[in-house]
Image: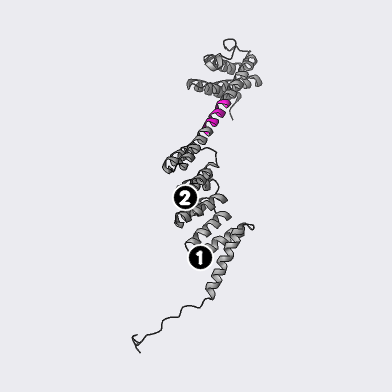
Amino acid sequence: MASPVQTVIQHLSRAKAAFLKGETLRPLVCVAEALKIVLTTKLHSQDMAKVAGLLRENVQNLGKLEGVASRVSSPLGYQPGAERKLLALLLPVIKALHAETKRESMGAVRERKLKIDHAIIHGTKALQGGKVDEAQGYFREAVDLYVDEHAMFLIIADRLQAAGAFKESFEYLRGALALNPDERKACEMVVAASEKVANPDRGLTLLQKIAEKKGAGPHLHLALARLLVLKKQWPEAEGHARAAAQAKDDLLDAHKLLRRLTARAAKAAKAPAAPQAGPGLDSPVPSS
């Protein structure tokens, strides 16, 4: 564990490095942390001599920063014994710079969200004009700006499907399911898109990859069952329908599909087997 004097020196070394990088807030915070230790810990005179030199250098550096100089009424300097007064001078500057940084961050977030909104609006207008490729350009621009706007993927997919662009919607449904693998609406939209493009394998591949990476919930199982029905893979469809019904007792669609599939399987089991063709007139006589 570092001694108090070592910790002070570390703070002041970080302050100098941050100043040389052109930072403003970090050098201030590091110097303030060093001053707090000096004020709350009794340092030997020899150690204090080392610290005083570093403090003097760093405080002179702080005075050269525009963001600091404009907020203090007199030039900054360090005098041994005046650490409390210096800290009291620096703390309001740190607070003001923190608030300024936060305002800038919030402004950047608002600007990014506004750009996403504009991209989706322009993409929707392009869709209304039948310009699917142009719409895709705007929608991909929105996705490039994505940070935490989770609903965006479903919004875009929904607008594409409303415009009949089912094939293009898979791209955004993949994004929605990556965030929430059991998103009911996304699972239903994958099935709808697969039906519309007459390609159940497209949806199956997407959902199976999501299930492998994230696991499968009841809505994803149900979507897999429906796609497997389209492919007439009855036992596999029944397995997923049963998994969906067992996982979510009130998922009525899963129970209905399971009843249909089990009834079908029972009927197929009762159906008489096709008669085997016996030896015909031209069949060779078995050798004795």
Pointer 2 residue: 166
* Type of secondary structure dominating the magenta stretch: helix
Q: Is residue 109 magenta?
A: yes
Residue 265 in the image: x percent, y percent?
54, 69
Q: Nearer the viewer, residue 21 or 83?
A: 21
Q: Nearest to the eye among marks 1 and 2: give it.
A: 2
Amino acid found under the numbered disc labelled 1: Trp
Q: If you read the primary sequence from the N terminus, does the residue marked by circle 1 or circle 2 appear first?
A: 2
Q: Amino acid at mark 2?
A: Phe
**Residue pictured at 51% horizontal, 65% vertical:** 234
Left or right, 235 with respect to 85, comes to left
Q: Residue at x 47, y 54 (%)?
A: 196
Q: Quadrant of the C terminus?
A: bottom left
Position of 13 relative to 146 (above/below):
above
Give yes or no for residue 237 being in the magenta stretch. Answer: no
The local secondary structure at tag 2 comes to helix
Residue 113 x, y percent position in the rendering? 53, 34
Q: Which segment did they paint magenta? A: 102-112
